Amino acid sequence: MNKFIKFWDKIEENLLIFLISVMGMALLLQIIVRFVFGFALPWPEEFGRYCQIWITFLGIGYGVRKNTHVGMNLLSEKYSETMKHIVDIFSNGLGIFGSIILLISSLKFISIQNVLSTAMQIPMYLVYAVIPISAVLSTIYYLANSVDSMKQLKKGRA
């Protein structure tokens, strides 16, 4: 599982950098065309919005993996090392629960998305496909974080 996580971590990081760069270039193109030529292209704003959706949901999984989401740090700082790991495991359990709910809901949502986007004419289910992907990745990362916390907890008791 660690090999998969390290492999996917690099892909995810590079994909996020790529999406942020492409989104910025598309929006910059829109600004230049609007102010220099006096008209607006129909697709850059929509493309930027869709990139932002992908960045947001891929960023959720990335944040879980790097353990940078707002958590129970304030509470856990006052506890012993053992209690910190227990709180981490509990927090990860809540994250897994939330990710599973997101996965189920997003699959239902995507199943009814049989429309095309306005400007780019792409199927909307492609835009929203990142939501269940993010939910699955988040679940995997929460599980990996829980396993790490359990190992640390076991070390502390040994």
Image: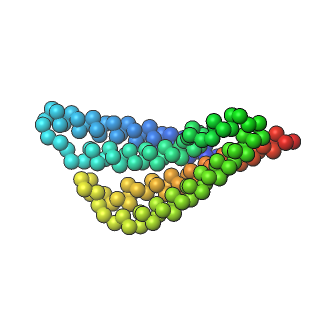
Q: Give 71 or 128, whichever is nearer the viewer.
A: 71
| Numbered-mark total | 0
Task: Give the residue furthest to the right.
Answer: 158
141 sits left or right of 14 in the view: right
Task: Give the residue furthest to the left.
Answer: 38
Which residue is painted at 28% across and 38% down in the image? 27
User: From the viewer's perspective, is residue 110 above or below residue 151?
Assistant: below
Location of residue 5 in the rendering, given as x and y in whole percent from the top left corner: 61, 46
Question: Which quadrant holds the C terminus?
Answer: top right
User: From the viewer's perspective, is residue 120 above or below residue 27?
Assistant: below
90 sits left or right of 104 in the view: right
Location of residue 57 in the rendering, given as x and y in whole percent from the top left corner: 46, 48
Which residue is painted at 25% across and 37% down in the image? 29
User: From the viewer's perspective, is residue 69 above or below residue 98?
Assistant: above
Which residue is painted at 38% across and 57% down in the image? 126
Residue 152: tell me if it is visible: no
133 sits left or right of 75 in the view: left
Residue 21: tell me if it is visible: yes
Location of residue 30 in the rendering, given as x and y in whole percent from the top left corner: 23, 38
Q: Give 92 or 37, whichever is nearer the viewer.
A: 92
Location of residue 82 in the rendering, given as x and y in whole percent from the top left corner: 78, 40
